[in-house]
Amino acid sequence: MDKEYLLTFENSHKAIEAESIMKDNNICILIMPTPTVITRSCGICIKFFEKDTHKVKALIDNGAIKIKSILLKTAQSYELISL
């Protein structure tokens, strides 16, 4: 099964910008409410899958998208990671 990751953001504007950029780069994403166990700073986050981690990392590394954190979904919760 493909691992699931969440990107969190400082604000909704950055999340919406990232959504557009990720879609333009053919990354399969899902916009969803940010689970309150993660953060309360921005109400939306982006879910993506393991097959696209290299594309997401490139967008983060080159500054195309500005994120707050990356989390890996585990059986019980979410684990803060870096790609």
Image (cartoon, rainbow, N blue to C red):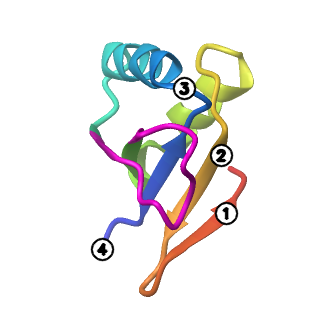
Is the residue marked by circle 4 packed among few (<14), some (14-19), or many (20+) residues within 10 Å?
A: few
On the image, numbered disc 1 is attached to which residue? Answer: 80
Q: Do the residues labelled 4 and 3 touch (CB within 8 Å)?
A: no
Task: Give the labeled residue for mark 4.
Answer: 1
**Residue type highlighted by circle 3:** Asn
Q: How far apart are marks 2 and 4 (CA)?
A: 23 Å
Could you tell me if the residues under marks 2 and 1 are in contact, i.e. CB atoms within 8 Å? yes
Query: Which of the two labelled residues, at mark 4 and mark 1, occupies the earlier sequence position?
Result: 4
- Give the secondary structure at mark 4: loop
Circle 3 sits in a helix, a strand or a loop, which is it?
loop
Vertical position of residue 9 compared to residue 71: above or below:
above
Location of residue 71 by image quarter = bottom right
- How far is mark 4 from mark 3, CA to CA? 31 Å
The numbered mark at residue 69 is 2
Residues in magenta, as a range: 31-45
The tag earlier along the polypeptide, 3 or 2, is 3
Dominant secondary structure of the residues highlighted in magenta in the image: loop
| The one of 32 and 27 positioned closer to us in this rendering | 32
Kind of element beneath mark 1: strand
Distance, label 2 to label 1, CA atoms, is 7 Å
Three-letter amino acid code of the residue under disc 2: Ser
Q: In this view, does 79 lie to the left or right of 72?
A: right
Q: Name the residue under label 3.
A: 11
Going from N to C along the chain, the mark reached first, 2 or 1, is: 2
Structural crowding at the residue carrying mark 2, measured as other residues with C-alpha within 10 Å and reported as few (<14), some (14–19) or many (≥20): some
Separation of marks 4 and 1 at Cα, in angstroms: 20 Å
Of tags 2 and 4, the one toward the viewer is 2
Pick the front one: 52 or 60? 60
Which marked residue is nearer to the observer: mark 4 or mark 3? 3
